[in-house]
Image (spheres, coloured by chain):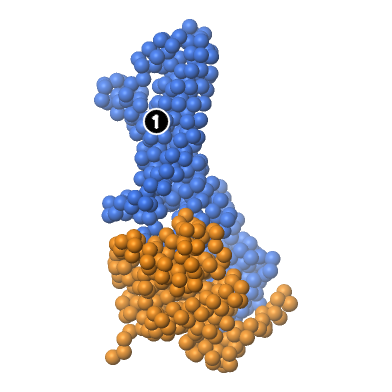
């Protein structure tokens, strides 16, 4: 029962019983089979040969989406075969890198569509008060303590790390300028956002992930509610409103702790500390920090909700969604910080005529 | 001319990744009947229910609601039409963050604009219909309820919007025999009192015997040949026991048959 098709000699029936082994023996078949999408025509009597699977090999033959038997299409379950030679052709570093790039582009595209869908839903109908208030409370009020602690320690840490260098140049009185500029422009917004990505983002992803695996999101749809409008839109609004407000709190906490540590512990004069702080911190610095936090809020909410909605089944899936939400938010915050920092600096230079860093 | 079936499947197929779950399924559900869909785990019973509600989209074929292809409906129309269906999920799928009272009133609050008092009256009535005391159960969160109570709250929530079709996804799974019988009785009473068409997915033959007017049996595709139909039985519940196809009678009797031999051989 051998056959000639598209220039490939098909093996006889006894050989088909050991089809995966034959592929291993003839590795040059692999690209041919992949190119042909493995449309193999066989006599119906040989069907069992395609279904046979060596017990030691269980991974499905991924390049075999369709197998035809005398003109009748087999379902995929029948087309699944084991293989040993194909992975070698697909596991080069270039393939791995390509796979990662495709996955990244796909994730970014999916996230963008998800965000646009949420904004589209918001333009049609705003979340009702009884849905929005609990989310605002959870994201905003319940995060105040951690954000104050974060901001407070950041202010003191900057003071500790910069004091020695400034003291060597007899410029310790100007410590307030570096603490507050760094805090308002960079560390306050970024560290507050990272803390919220951990506290709020992971929690949102885990909550929505649990809702997904327990069919609560399906239940929302069945009850005529739009899951994105009901679950994602309030969280997006809450993050957009609350992350900048919490950043203000972190900034204030850092400013106060930095001032206390510098003046009370390191012995810097109060007057000079505030004089230099006011001289160097411009409204632009505060505004740029807060504008960053707005985008951080959008990123945290969108990524966390997206991971929750795409959570895989089981407790492991929920845990993974929470981890992915934090990791993706962390990376997104750093990328947004860099891009917005560059953009805002260029904008500042454009508006006030200072020479660009290039 | 007879009215179109309440729900109709025309050559519906559904895949998840590379795995085909349903292949060329054709099925009709007439007004007022109680149809039980039986079959082994993984044969596509729950997928069939979700395809009816358009919680999943078929890869081929079409699903019709009272003669209207679901795919032709716009999103607002689809959401509106979904309210004709009540869905009791396998694990009830109650919203964890809401109380029982808010769960049952969710659909009313989301889709209609009745007064608070009107919603309260409807919620009370539905909770009593399923044998629960509103003042005791109403303020509780789902986590504080037993499995049977959760199922009953889920049923009350599904009935709150007075659906024309009720879909039950394994309503007695995980319940003790007494509570299973209570749920079966509630399904029967709901169909009778409210003139509701019911589609029950189950592998509990007690449920089938108690509630079914008609039974269809799906068979897992992995165990079928390429041209064999997936729907291997479609007939009255009483006749399923002595069906010609041995796979049907074997399932109804709960006999492992060749599966046991395969297990021993492996």
Q: Nearer the viewer, residue B245 or A149?
A: A149
The N terminus of chain B - image quarter: bottom left
The C terminus of chain B - image quarter: bottom right
Q: Say whether residue B224 is left or right of residue A192.
A: right
Task: Provide residue A138's location: percent of width, then percent of height.
Answer: 45, 44
Image quadrant assignment for residue A20: bottom right
Secondary structure of the residue carrying tag 1 is: helix
Task: Provide residue A237's location: percent of width, then percent of height.
Answer: 36, 45
Label 1: chain letter: A
Image quadrant assignment for residue B164: bottom left
Identify whether A37 is placed above or below B32: above
Residue at 38 percent across and 68 percent down: it is: B122
Residue at 54 percent across and 62 percent down: it is: B145
Residue at 50 percent across and 47 percent down: it is: A203
Q: Could you tell me if residue B164 is visible in this image?
A: yes
Q: Residue furthest front?
A: B135
Task: Provide residue A236's location: percent of width, then percent of height.
Answer: 38, 46
Q: Say whether residue A351 is left or right of residue A259.
A: left
Q: Which chain is blue?
A: A
Identify whether B51 is placed above or below B247: above
Task: Provide residue B62's location: percent of width, then percent of height.
Answer: 37, 76
- At label 1, counting other C-alpha atoms closer than 10 Å, the crowd grade (few under 14, some 14-19, many 20 or more) is many
Q: For mark 1, what is the residue?
A: A248
Q: Nearer the viewer, residue B95 or B5?
A: B95
- Marks counted in the figure total 1
Q: Nearer the viewer, residue A101 or A322?
A: A322
Q: Which chain is orange?
A: B
Q: Residue furthest top?
A: A170
Q: Could you tell me if residue A337 is visible in this image?
A: no
Residue at 42 percent across and 75 percent down: it is: B166
């Amino acid at each position: 029962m051998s056959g000639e098709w598209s220039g490939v000699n098909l093996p006889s029936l006894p050989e088909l019983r050991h089809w995966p082994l034959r592929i291993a023996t003839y590795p040059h078949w692999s690209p041919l089979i992949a190119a042909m999408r493995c449309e193999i025509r066989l006599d119906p009597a040989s069907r069992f040969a395609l279904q046979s699977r060596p017990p030691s090999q269980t991974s499905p033959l991924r390049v075999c989406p369709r197998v035809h038997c005398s003109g009748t299409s087999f379902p995929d379950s029948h087309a699944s075969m084991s293989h040993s030679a194909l992975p070698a052709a697909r596991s080069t570093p270039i393939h791995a890198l390509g796979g990662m790039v495709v996955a990244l582009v796909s994730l970014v595209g999916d996230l963008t569509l998800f965000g646009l869908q949420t904004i589209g839903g918001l333009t049609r109908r705003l979340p009702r008060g009884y849905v929005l208030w609990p989310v605002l409370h959870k994201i905003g009020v319940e995060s105040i303590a951690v954000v104050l602690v974060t901001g407070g320690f950041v202010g003191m840490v900057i003071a500790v790390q910069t004091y020695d260098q400034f003291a060597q140049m007899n410029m310790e009185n100007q410590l307030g300028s570096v603490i507050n500029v760094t805090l308002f422009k960079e560390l306050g917004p970024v560290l507050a956002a990272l803390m919220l990505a951990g506290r709020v983002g992971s929690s949102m992803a885990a909550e929505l992930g649990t809702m997904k695996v327990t069919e609560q999101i399906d239940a929302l749809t069945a009850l005529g509610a739009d899951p994105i409008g009901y679950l994602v839109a309030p969280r997006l609004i809450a993050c957009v409103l609350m992350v900048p407000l919490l950043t203000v709190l972190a900034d204030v906490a850092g400013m106060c702790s930095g001032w206390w540590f510098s003046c009370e512990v390191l012995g810097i004069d109060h007057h000079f500390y505030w004089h230099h702080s006011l001289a160097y911190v411009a409204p632009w610095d505060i505004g740029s920090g807060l504008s960053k936090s707005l985008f951080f809020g959008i990123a945290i909410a969108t990524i966390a909700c997206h991971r929750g909605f795409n959570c895989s089944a089981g407790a492991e899936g929920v845990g993974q969604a929470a981890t992915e939400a934090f990791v993706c938010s962390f990376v997104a915050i750093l990328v947004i910080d860099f891009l917005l920092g560059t953009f805002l600096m260029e904008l500042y230079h454009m508006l006030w005529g200072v020479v660009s860093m290039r | 001319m007879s009215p179109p079936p309440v729900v109709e499947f025309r050559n519906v197929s559904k895949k998840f990744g590379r795995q085909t779950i349903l292949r060329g399924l054709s099925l009709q559900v007439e007004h007022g009947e109680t149809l039980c869909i039986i079959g082994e785990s993984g044969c596509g019973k729950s997928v069939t229910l979700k395809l009816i509600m358009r919680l999943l989209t078929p890869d081929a074929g079409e699903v019709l609601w009272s003669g209207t292809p679901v795919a032709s409906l716009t999103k607002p129309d689809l959401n509106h039409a979904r309210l004709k269906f009540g869905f009791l999920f396998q694990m009830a799928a109650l919203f964890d963050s809401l109380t029982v009272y808010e769960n049952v009133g969710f659909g009313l609050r989301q889709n209609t604009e009745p007064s608070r008092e009107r919603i309260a009256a409807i919620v009370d009535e539905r909770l009593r219909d399923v044998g629960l005391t509103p003042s005791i159960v109403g303020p509780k969160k789902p986590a504080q309820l037993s499995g049977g109570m959760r199922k009953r709250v889920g049923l009350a929530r599904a009935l709150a919007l007075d659906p024309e079709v009720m879909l039950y996804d394994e309503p007695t799974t995980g319940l003790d025999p007494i509570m299973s019988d209570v749920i079966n009785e509630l399904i029967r009473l709901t169909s009778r009192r409210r003139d509701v068409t019911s589609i029950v997915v189950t592998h509990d033959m007690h449920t089938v015997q108690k509630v079914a007017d008609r039974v269809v049996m799906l068979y897992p595709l992995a165990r079928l040949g390429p041209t064999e139909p997936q729907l291997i039985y479609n007939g009255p519940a009483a006749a399923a026991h002595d069906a010609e196809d041995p796979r049907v009678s074997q399932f109804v009797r709960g006999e492992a048959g060749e599966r046991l031999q395969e297990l021993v051989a492996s």
